[in-house]
Image (tube, helix red, strand yellow):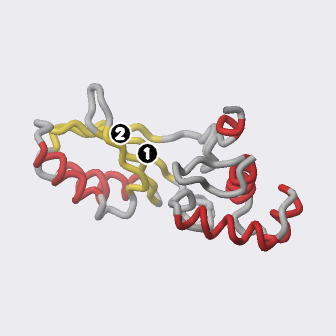
Amino acid sequence: MKNAISEDKQLDNYDISLLAALQRDGHATHQQIGEQIHLSPSQVSRRVQRLQAAGYIQRFVALLSPEAVGLGVRAVSYVALTRNSGDEGLVFEREIALIPEVLECYSIAGESDYILHIVVTDLRSLSESVLRRVTRIPGVGSVRSNIVLSCIKATTELPLEQLARR
């Protein structure tokens, strides 16, 4: 087993276990993580620093409950551009990045060009502020939205156990 990230950025089993532990609880101390994965706190600390420097760990955040903070309405919107030339796509992407209610935007292949994950306080906010702003972006041909009734699964944890099997 390797003890550090190698030059080709391969993860060893300790790295994978460390990343999995951080995904479950990013607030855990190096002591707590070390006990879970059988490394000393100083080894955990060095690995965390190395994983951050290598780009595996982007940042540490607190995951908030949208409902608890009053953002209980979610929607998934499908956006089709009139033409998907380079400029229209770039304009759309630049403008959509400025709308805070859009949590995620994915460029996709298929009938639509983009999928948006939107969170707002109420349906009026969805209609008046968010969707109206999206439809005003130059090059937007159509927007189809679906209201999320309930969340069946939502996770930020990547399936790292697949990496350990290789």
34 and 8: which is toward the camera: 8
Q: Residue at x 59, y 40 (%)?
A: 150
Q: CA distance from mark 1 to mark 2?
A: 6 Å
Q: List x then y, in percent, for residue 8.
A: 52, 49
56 and 124: which is toward the camera: 56
Ranked by sequence position, the earlier of labels 1 and 2 is 1
6 and 76: which is toward the camera: 6
Q: Residue at x 60, y 41 (%)?
A: 151
Question: Which residue position is annotated with label 1?
Answer: 75
Badge 1 marks a residue whose secondary structure is strand
Q: Which mark is residue 59?
A: none
Do callouts 1 and 2 mark residues in contact (Cβ within 8 Å)?
yes
| Amino acid at dot 2 | Ser
Residue 77 picture quarter: top left
Q: Which mark is residue 145?
A: 2
Q: Residue at x 24, y 53 (%)?
A: 93
Q: Judge the density around disc 1: few (<14), some (14-19), many (≥20) Cα neighbours within 10 Å.
A: some
97 and 30: which is toward the camera: 30
Horizontal arrangement in the rendering, residue 38 relative to residue 56 (left or right): right
Badge 2 marks a residue whose secondary structure is strand
Q: Residue at x 22, y 36 (%)?
A: 80
Indicate whether 61 appears above or below 144: below
Indicate whether 40 appears above or below 113: below
Residue 166 picture quarter: top right
